[in-house]
Image: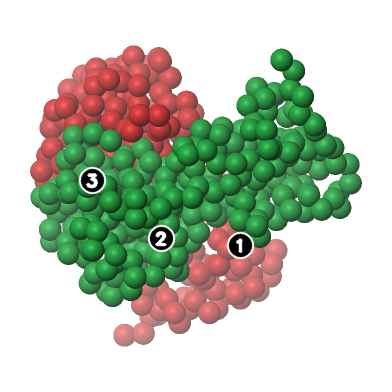
Chain colours: A green, B red
Amino acid sequence: MADRREVREITSPSNALLKVFRRALAEGVTREGWLAVEGPHLLEEALQAVPRVAVERVLVARSGARKFSALLARLPQEAEVTHVSDHLFARVAQTESPQGIAALVERRADDLDAVLARGDALLLAACGLQDPGNLGTMMRSGQALGATALLTLEGTVSAFNPKAVRASAGAVFHLPIFQEQKPGRLFPRLRAAGVRIVAADRHSPAPVVQADLRGSVAILIGQEGAGLPPEISREASLLLSIPIRAGTDSLNAATAASVFLYEVARQREFRY
Amino acid sequence: MADRREVREITSPSNALLKVFRRALAEGVTREGWLAVEGPHLLEEALQAVPRVAVERVLVARSGARKFSALLARLPQEAEVTHVSDHLFARVAQTESPQGIAALVERRADDLDAVLARGDALLLAACGLQDPGNLGTMMRSGQALGATALLTLEGTVSAFNPKAVRASAGAVFHLPIFQEQKPGRLFPRLRAAGVRIVAADRHSPAPVVQADLRGSVAILIGQEGAGLPPEISREASLLLSIPIRAGTDSLNAATAASVFLYEVARQREFRY
């Protein structure tokens, strides 16, 4: 069956929709709250989100229309598709080698109370990270290794930063995300829900491998370089380190988070 | 005691040494084989290398001369120090916020036979990775988690790529590195030395946690996205995967390498 969708076409470089896409792809999120994604892989991941997220608009370069016909045919009915020349698409795209497709997509709407109610919650809490690539890699590892949500404290780079979304490899659509959390409200809420608060602290003498991490836990990951500020570490009931070779610096923040997630997954026998 | 070193000064933007630095910082290595590093942290790490590496030249921005006086005082005698204006330094630097110090440093000279002779070798072998940030993160994790060398197969991004050096956080000076290895020579050599060849293969049904990784091993890490080509996987005596949540994509290549390293370190009880 042919796709009967009405397709618009833009030829003017000053078109308002192009401006919306350019800005959204640079900033990550539109003023209305739509998440901007570039490339077929991220759009595929968005279409696989559970529960479903709406696709508002799709921008396709002329050369992409045929290449992505299968993907375009699977778009939900509400999605408005607009074609542009490859030249105009390249001016809107933020990647060095634009793949010819971009979209504005709804963000997940999740309920933190529901996440906390699980007896085996595994929350990854980014506390002040500034590198969007690190935050994206943490989302990717979290989704793969069984995290049940990503939390970010206020002052942390946005999980919807375009670099974070790319590094997440689509995890941004699968992992419940709760941003801009205030420590004074979040930590009492975690404790009330019976979630143990565990800080990744490279100076702790207690190695992660000797702690029992099978109940509900939140793993706090600090800023690159500086680590967790004392007022946040203080909230943890357990400070754990990854034992590293003497005289070496430390692990990258996203790597440390991934090793903690792996250790929790291992202790839970990889039952996700 | 005052530093009696003779300090040169450059004021012309067309000075040949500035061109050497600009090119070296962009490409990572000079034609003569010196490694170019930017920022005090990497230079500190170079000074801590064992065995010692020579420092050929140091370029200091005017504003850096006082800020880095302690570091400059610790330079080896052979190092030639040159001052430039902050403006000229910024034109040479490759980082967005230049810190005002850069250097040309000797690379480690290591002997692969000596590395292979250890009974507990832990070799990280990058097979086709293209992202310098990933390779640098692998070096950083390798250094922290007990790797005894980094090997790269021909066709892999250079470990001396400036982005790799930065992401390594100095590990490039501490970890023996053997690049551009030819599979036809390397794998027989590893086998002859009694090193078990283990492929990180996300499609393998054998989980890494169930293998005994306490003897000498080489961990093969494939390219981002594509993974290991079949002709390389075939060389491995063991294909192992990290068990991840069903329906999820995979881990980032550097993250997967780090989890393998952690699992080996854990089995060896973190005795580095």
Inspect the image, locate mark 1, and give the three-letter code of the amino acid beneath it: Val
The location of residue B46, given as percent across then percent down, is 35, 58
Q: Count up the numbered dots.
A: 3
The location of residue A271, given as percent across then percent down, is 23, 34
Residue A152 numbered mark, or none: 2
Inspect the image, locate mark 3, and give the three-letter code of the amino acid beneath it: Asp
Q: Secondary structure at mark 3?
A: loop
Please tell me how crowded label 2 is: few (under 14), some (14-19), or many (20+) other residues with Cα within 10 Å: many
- The residue indicated by pointer 1 is B92
**Residue B216 in sight:** no
Q: Which of label 1 and label 2 is nearer to you? A: 2
Q: Quadrant of residue B2?
A: bottom left
**Which residue lies at the image location 40% right of the left edge and 15% below the top edge?**
B230
**Which residue lies at the image location 23% right of the left edge and 40% below the top edge?**
A265
- The residue indicated by pointer 3 is A120
Q: Chain of mark 1?
A: B
Do callouts 1 and 2 point to residues on the same chain? no
Please tell me how crowded label 1 is: few (under 14), some (14-19), or many (20+) other residues with Cα within 10 Å: many
Q: Chain of mark 2?
A: A
Q: Chain of mark 3?
A: A
The location of residue B265, given as percent across then percent down, is 18, 41
The location of residue A90, given as percent across then percent down, is 75, 42
Q: Hey, which residue is sitting farthest bottom in the picture?
A: B1
Inspect the image, locate mark 2, and give the three-letter code of the amino acid beneath it: Thr
